[in-house]
Amino acid sequence: MEILAVENLSFSYPLCNEKALDGVSFSVEKGDFVAVCGATGSGKSTLLRLLKKETAPAGELTGEVRYNGGCCSGGAGSIGFVMQRPEQQIVTDKVWHELAFGLENLNIPSGEIRRRVSEMACYFGIEEWFDKSVNELSGGQKQLLNLAGVMVMQPDVLLLDEPTAQLDPIAAQEFISTVSRLNRELSLTVIIVEHRLEDVLACANKLLVLENGGISDYADVRTVAQNLRSKPELLKGMPAAVRLYSRFDKTCVCPITVREGRDFIERGFKNSVRCVQGKPYVHSAAPALEFSDVFFRYSRGEPDVLRGLSFTVYEGEIFCILGGNGSGKSTALETAARLNKIYSGSVKVFGKKLGEYKNQSLYKGCLSMLPQDVQTVFLKNTVAEELADAGAVADSLPYDLSALYERHPYDLSGGQQQLVALAKVLASKPRLILLDEPTKGLDAHARGAIAEILKQIKASGMTVVIVTHDAEFAAECADRCAMFFRGEITSCDVPGGFFPSNSFYTTAASRITRGYYDGAITVDDVERLCRANLREEGERCL
Amino acid sequence: MGIEKYNPAAILIYFLCVTLVAMFCRNPVLILISLGGAAALFLCRDGGGGVRTHAAFFGLFIIMALINPLFSHNGATVLFVVNNNPVTAEALIYGVFSSALIIAVLYWFRSFSLIMTSDRLLYVFGAASPKLALILSMALRYIPLFKKQATRTLRTQRALGLYTDNNIIDTARGSGRVLSVMVTWALENGIITADSMSARGYASGKRSSFSLYRFGKRDAAFVLSVLVLFAVPFATALTGLLEVRWYPIVQPPPASAAVLTAYVCYALLAFLPAVIETGEDIKWKYLRSKI
């Protein structure tokens, strides 16, 4: 049964000549799980917002959106909407009140609200934090609360606009699997815009590709994925299995999940050549950052956050720190930037203890840090003022920002914000830069750009320390990776040795090839190995 | 768990009644009962941990009790004379009782703030005005969020070397910059919150107001008994039977059946929460010993 139909929808924002959407038509069946992908600025979010009357942006609109055969309405409750930032979507101060908020708006009597709220709290496993204040929740819990707050209104359609962009991979997986469960058990129709497609595509049954405001492909996930060979930009955001598939001219069905990817390799390629030749790791003799037996806690009564942390980062390398939420990774980075006072041990930057840098000399030409929330970097109204404030010289930047000079930093896309923030960080000409989750919320394109810039920065002699959840990113640009657990580093190795020995904190490519090939961590590695292992003509092939 | 198992509105009524009687009657017996009940409740709630509170209240009590005889020289019984000013027993007695009254009210307030947490208060406001309750709830959500973001921005600017705290002027300038950007941040993020609100049907019509608290039979019984125990002494006081003449000599009201009834009723009222609390403790111990 058709639940949502879009016919010839065109839309342009006020004071904007270009159409954000141009002649978009598609229909969604009840119970569909539609993933929407497309480059930044292709109109994904605009399309999603137009599907719900209450969130539709102002502008010039032609065409129509039909819901359940009628026109675009059915009450605020019948179409649910969850956005990117978990924190800002929460309205009230208590978890239970947040759950009830939507129902209050629909003027539903107390008894009914009580029943629905308690049922939904059970389903989402919220009971344990039901009485809590929302400030005490983690990011993942906040986003689940937002989802539950929408689901109590019993919508038929759920619209999700990059819901996991701000979450760590484990919370993101939990969120997506909850959505998938709602889709399976309640035949809830889901339309999701997402950059991180690795988990989403495994649950979706349809894939919609937007290009320049128009639909370029819309069909079954595998069919669309199979047709992506000619679109390298879109492929970047696809799961590793799809990217791998696109590199070969096979005619079999496109693999989506890790398991299918593994099947694809085993059937199509031999494994007589098992090992990818990694670069040998050489480091300079001079250490850039040294932690030795560092202990730190936020206040006297609390447990230690850093427990005897020791590691050394050498000059001119990119050092990635991975690890779970709350393991103390960010705290370690802040400690290196002298934002935390340690009570035992020592931290040295370029051979000098932090305390020996007097006044601001640590932050001038020596060390600089980019925090997780880039909004905290911005103080001014335009990008140009922002750069001038930090004393950044446009010519000395490894990339060009001049197109953005007149824009407000908050109006930029996530990737652009990251670049402007990085420019501010580089302005003090540091020799060591510390980055906290530089790829959070970014699409594949922006991630690639950041990785390229970091490699350039490294080539110019800077040392980079990155805290990240993004294994793919670390595999691509790190010289060494370290695993952080309970306030200390438990293992540290080059990516080629680090990722194949992990089961969860590893890349999809490494999971696909585990036990079949050794040391392959990126899709490029796997491709090289596969090419070396091509089966002879006539051998078993799909 | 003691008195807070009742509906917040019932708790509010209780606290209003119990303080009103003591303040209105100014009868030494009622004041002493009130002080006893208030201190007993606070001790139950606090588990005897608030030593500093008790000490502070006792100090305050002494000071206030001594101030009255120093300034008021009414009364027939002169104790001694200071600088040609007589210090009288009546003024001292009046001082003692009026400061006892203030301390009693302070104790009631301390217990009140321990028991009426923000969501209980919000519920009571919500009953009066659902709009006000929502605004308060949003403010309680937003203020910690704003503070957290401001702290994070300050730390970021420090690590970028753009914020120095070498001297007061630099600190002020740095904080000023952060504060001004926080206004932008608040507006920008307010838009997302507004979107999230309208996506969930806010302003689409009449709203209902939901609360975790229900007003059940037990609450009704509690409120009813509180009101009866309040009405008896209050009515007696209105007839003037409880009135005390402090000067020139202290004349307590003549003991009669009505006056005694008023005292007993008020004592029941004042010690009600403490009785509920200790009663429950004993019940738990009893149940545990049976297990």
Image (tube, helix red, strand yellow):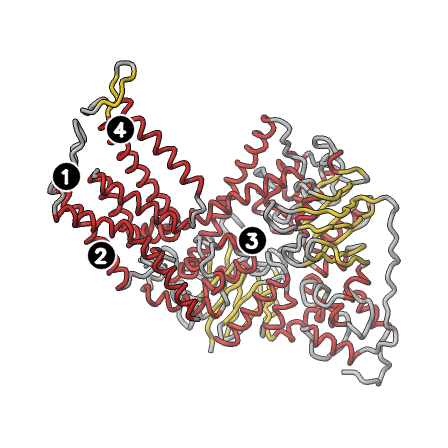
Q: Quick one: A498 or A258, which is closer to the camera? A: A498
Task: Work out whether disc 1 and disc 2 sit on a shared chain.
Answer: yes
Give the mark nearest the N terminus, 1 or 2.
2
Q: Quadrant of the C terminus of chain A?
A: bottom right
> Helix, strand, or loop for circle 2?
helix
Residue A427 point in image, percent of width and height? 71, 38
Task: Work out whether disc 1 and disc 4 sit on a shared chain.
Answer: yes
Q: Residues within 10 Å of mark 1 (few under 14, many from 20)?
A: some
> Label for residue B225?
2
Residue A480 point in image, percent of width and height? 80, 55
Q: Which residue is mark 3?
A: A18
Q: Chain of mark 3?
A: A
- Mark 4: amino acid: Leu
Q: Residues within 10 Å of mark 3 (few under 14, many from 20)?
A: few
Mark 3 or 2: in front is: 2
Q: Quick one: A507 or B33, which is closer to the camera? A: B33
Find out whether the residues at labels 1 and 3 contact each other: C-beta distance under 8 Å.
no
Q: Residue at x 45, y 63 (%)?
A: A150
Name which quarter of the figure residue B27 lies in. Answer: top left
Note whether A454 is above or below A262 in the view shown. above
- Mark 1: amino acid: Pro
Q: Which residue is mark 1?
A: B253
Give the mark nearest the N terminus, 1 or 4.
4
Q: Chain of mark 2?
A: B
> Helix, strand, or loop for circle 3?
loop
